[in-house]
Image (tube, rainbow, N blue to C red):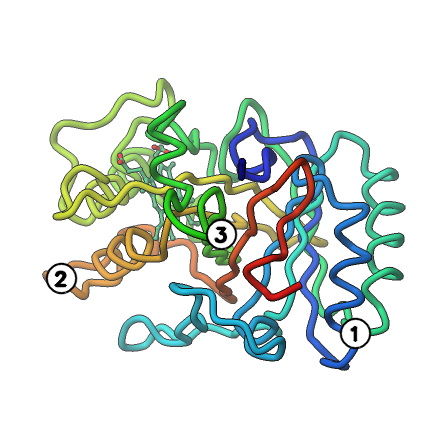
Amino acid sequence: MNTAQSGILAALPTHARYLSFSLNDPGQAGTCLTALRETIDGENTVIGIGPSLAAALGATIPGLKPCPSTTAPGLSLELPPDALWLWLRGDDRGELLHRARRLVSIAKPAFTLREVVDAFKHREGRDLSGYEDGTENPEGEAADAAALANTGALAGSSFVATQRWQHDFGRFDAMASDAQDNAIGRRQSDNEELDDAPESAHVKRTAQESFAPEAFVLRRSMPWAEGMAGGLMFVAFGRSFDAFEAQLKRMTGGEDGIVDALFGFTRPVSAAYFWCPALRDGRVDLGPLGL
Ligand code: HEM
């Protein structure tokens, strides 16, 4: 039976590394992926296959597609090379570095490492703005239903949308605490949802039950920092990209012209889409890729 890569459903780790690769030798891709399969357990390391890699292997993964670079007027995103994505989860940065080095060398004949983002858990699971993130995530069977495809050859696999957001801490600090709470739609002090939040509040833009059909995703975002810059590595797993795209459309004003107040202090700088294969008998199932 196919099961999900368990790192997708598990609680967030203390530390993580996101590795993004481009494909430089399509002829070696199959061999490298089967070699990676021997070390990737789906729990400590989650693997995602990008649309360019699936295409290079001559495989069609229904629902996998390139991430759009523009989602709204004035919002244009950098699209880093998106052949292969590895999410390394752990609690020791040294171990994560050495695991990354091993994986990069196994992947090397076919793939070139393009981007490394180091991420971490902040306090009990807060964004760097100080707000708790993940409160309204589905749990248990609802999490499975939101995050995992449940029929056919793709059962147990998941589609992940990633967006690296960079915060402007100066702008955030300059906002009064009421304005900050109104931007999110929850009180930072006790995480209570504000009944009278404006329509631009982030949680009003994204309220999952308010979409038709309902738009549930499983968010596994983590803060990132590099030098004095930082923000949120937004990561949403879905049974397709539909729920994520519906949320993003409303956030960017595509439904009613109202833009999410988050944009007042943060913006996405890069984005990508990947397909995360299921596990079969405990190993990453590369069957849908013809491997
Ligand atoms: C810097 C970027 C972002 C920050 C800081 C952020 C932060 C938050 C916070 C603090 C909450 C409230 C607590 C919770 O339920 O988790 C929340 C909720 C949520 N966010 Fe975000 N978010 C960001 C980007 C996004 C993006 C890009 C999407 C999807 C396109 C999204 C989708 C959601 C959803 C679905 C909820 C739950 C809404 C509900 O059903 O109540 N977020 N976010």
Q: Residue at x 55, y 22 (%)?
A: 124
The image quadrant where one finds the N terminus is top right
Residue 127: x %, y % from top left: 49, 38
Residue 10: name its quadrant: top right
Nearest to N terminus: mark 3 or mark 2: 3
Nearest to N terminus: mark 1 or mark 3: 1
Q: Is residue 278 found left or right of 103 in the rendered image?
A: left
195, 1: nearer the viewer: 1
Residue 38: x %, y % from top left: 80, 48
According to the picture, the residue beneath numbered tag 3 turns out to be 170
- Which mark is nearer the camera, 3 or 2? 2
Mark seen at residue 110: 1
Q: Is residue 284 found left or right of 194 in the rendered image?
A: right
Nearest to N terminus: mark 2 or mark 1: 1
> Rounded to the nearest whole Å, what is the CA distance between mark 1 and mark 3?
42 Å
Q: Residue at x 85, y 46 (%)?
A: 99
